[in-house]
Amino acid sequence: MLFNSYVFLLAFLPATWILFHLLVRGDNRRRALALLVGASLVYYGWWNPLYLGLVIPLLVIDYLLAKAIARLRAKRPAQAKVLLVLGMVINLGALGYYKYANFFIDNINRLAGFHLELATVVLPIGISFFTFQKIAFLVDVHEGKISHVNWLDYILFIMFFPQLIAGPIVHHSEVIPQFLGLKRVSARSMGSGLTILILGLAKKVLLADGAARLSSPLFDAAAAGSHLDLLTSWGATLAYTVQIYFDFSGYSDMAIGLGLLFGIRLPVNFNSPYKAASVIEFWRRWHITLSRFLRDYLYIPLGGSRRGAARRYLNLAMTMVLGGLWHGAGWTFVMWGALHGSYLMINHGWHALRARLQLATDQSHPAWGWFSRVITFLAVIIAWVFFRAANLRTAWDVLLAMAGRYGMTWPSPMGGPALLSILGLLVVCWVAPNTQELTAYVGPEGAYRAEERAPLALRYRWKPSARWAITIGCTAALCLMMFSQVSEFIYFQF
């Protein structure tokens, strides 16, 4: 069931919302939470009811392991550690089998000349996201950060449908206290949630899907062996750069908006990453909750920066390569992660060199700021080629085309209006206020507040008014009329 579909927006969501608020107004908090659990299971099972046969047993096992770890942590720490390792093996084993088994079998066959075969494995949707949440929960129980949680709160923490399929990867401390303190949702909060929901829907339906119609045929042609010319290869890559930006930004907005409709504030997961002036800053703005998980549960346990510069750079590289592999079972994703690991090593190395040589750079100067943003953006779009390409050969071919290997055709096969529309959307990415700035939304983490000095954000800040109601209503109607071809969000495949 897609967020951008009639069945979700016109049937599932209204029915769930009405029943939920009837229970909340009747002071039936636990029944309201139970309704959300049931609705989330229906939402997940809508894709394929067989998925529930995997998800529910894993939820039960993880919950029982968490309770046992909490009970044994102080008195029998060795046994608690064994249970923690068991839980991680079970979760990573399930993820590895469903997501990576065929990938490894194919590579073994290619390298060793074997002919091993594995039955077709269908990836349970969202498994990468809720696996990370369950692992983080077990680790935090083992470290004493969680003393007790009941079954209903736990299952909703994992399965809450606004963030179940593609994040954000929520931390227990952000949402479980909200479940415990659930109360009636104010009219203002519901208005804000509906506004953010429609803004996200518009980003997906009107902007991301439009850019996909430009990029997808060209990347498919490159995968089939066609050589793109200079302008077409740049146009295809920039179109995908725009597509994935508005696709993931739109999903992140819709998740937050849906959460607000049920009185739950989800963490901000997207914060204008193309405005970043460094790759370090990019990863503080792009998929924020994944970056946080990789830092807290992988990079720091590996040693972080505590064991010297060489080990720090190795840890960065390992973290980003694994982060790339998390996105998909393919060498293109590994290469994408390795590139970002290299970028981060260069970025940190540059900071260390400046500090050692006491080099002064006036980073407040506008020219330096724009130079840093351009360099960062170029690095990001080069990596996007690998992220989007069907295989490494296609990625290299597109990059060669972008370097001028196959010449330039004018007028471009992509067309002048298409190129101008892509450039216009890039300007929106760089200049326009984001959803947090427009709506003054603050997540449970409280760290990504609207920038009060942003003049456009101040001028067009959301507030309950006839102008905003008409604007959002017309936008929603336009989106509904564009549902002739419903497409998945990009991150649904991970």
Image (cartoon, rainbow, N blue to C red):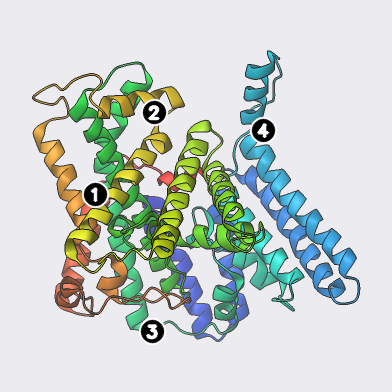
Q: Amino acid at mark 1?
A: Leu
Camera-nearest label, 4 or 1: 4
- The answer to whether residue 403 is left or right of residue 126 is left
Q: CA distance from mark 4 to mark 1?
A: 36 Å
Q: Which mark is residue 186?
A: 3
Q: Earlier in the sequence, mark 2 or mark 4?
A: 4
Q: Secondary structure at mark 4?
A: helix
Disc 3 to disc 1: CB gap under 8 Å:
no
86, above or below 194, in the image: above
Disc 1 to disc 2: CB gap under 8 Å:
no
Q: In the rendered image, which quarter is residue 287 located in?
A: bottom left
Q: How many marks?
A: 4
For mark 1, does the 10 Å Cα neighbourhood hold few (<14), some (14 to 19), or many (20 or more) residues? some
Q: Which mark is residue 395?
A: 2
Q: CA distance from mark 3 to mark 1?
A: 30 Å
- Work out whether residue 40 or residue 346 is closer to the camera in this orientation and state it: 346
Which residue is labeled 1 in the image? 206
For mark 4, does the 10 Å Cα neighbourhood hold few (<14), some (14 to 19), or many (20 or more) residues? some
Q: CA distance from mark 2 to mark 4?
A: 24 Å
